[in-house]
Image (cartoon, helix red, strand yellow):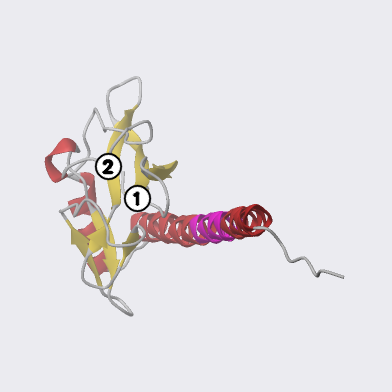
Amino acid sequence: MIKRGDTIIEVILAVTIFSAVAVAALTLMNSGTAISQRSLETTLVRHQIDSQAEMLRFISSSTDPVFTEAWGSIKSKATSSPVTILDAETCPEVGGLNNPFVILPGGVNKLTVQNTFSGNPDTFARVTETSSQGISIQLAPISNIDGSVSAYDAYIQACWYGPGSSRPMTIGTIVRIYDSSN
């Protein structure tokens, strides 16, 4: 009796099927990792935007001289035409925004209003103690019928390039801040 082994065609077919299954599994795992990374980045950036909104609300309502001076400085940056970046194909350049700023936390009774916007961040949009990367605030005044300003809309937005995407990820919100100093 002659023993027969597998033919070269059968071996090549088996290796091809195994390779296709392995590539499909690795692609699926890579896609899952990218989705979870984007989700994590979105959550972290949402927290950064929320903290900017809370600092703006606090500064605008504070009676502490440090914060009332900062609120005056912030109000001077108000522009009637803020630029939204939420529909952009690319994250904006530094000069593309109207009077952007960000509030840098610095500990108890200390903050810095930074007048710059440093465009594309390394990983995700965030604010550190020394800089803003991909997050900006633009302030727009809301006028009463008599022309006086009673509130401001703060356009807080973030733009960054997430993993596995050629389009930027963007998140933004608009916060109305009533001016208690008037």
- Left or right of 24 on screen, residue 117: left
Residue located 23% across and 46% down the image: 75
Q: Residue furthest right?
A: 1
Q: Amino acid at mark 2?
A: Cys
Q: Give percent across and percent down for residue 181.
A: 31, 49
Q: Amino acid at mark 1?
A: Tyr
| Picture quadrant where residue 95 is located | top left
Q: Nearer the viewer, residue 72 or 16?
A: 16
Looking at the rendering, the stretch of residues picked out in magenta corresponds to 26-38
Which residue is identified by label 1? 161
- What secondary structure predominates along the stretch shown in magenta? helix
Q: Give yes or no for residue 84 being in the magenta stretch.
A: no
- Left or right of 42 on screen, residue 72: left
Mark 1 and mark 2 residues within 8 Å of each other at the beta carbon? yes
Q: Give yes or no for residue 35 being in the magenta stretch.
A: yes
Residue located 80% across and 70% down the image: 3
Which residue is identified by label 2? 91
Separation of marks 1 and 2 at Cα, in angstroms: 8 Å
Q: Nearer the viewer, residue 111 or 166?
A: 166
Residue located 18% across and 53% down the image: 73
Which of the image's four quarters has the N terminus? bottom right
Residue located 37% across and 30% down the image: 87
Relative vertical location of residue 9 with respect to residue 106 in this rendering, above or below: above
| Picture quadrant where residue 132 is located | bottom left
Q: Give percent across and percent down for residue 91.
A: 27, 42
- Left or right of 60 on screen, residue 10: right
Relative vertical location of residue 67 with respect to residue 115 in this rendering, above or below: below
Q: Is residue 80 visible?
A: yes
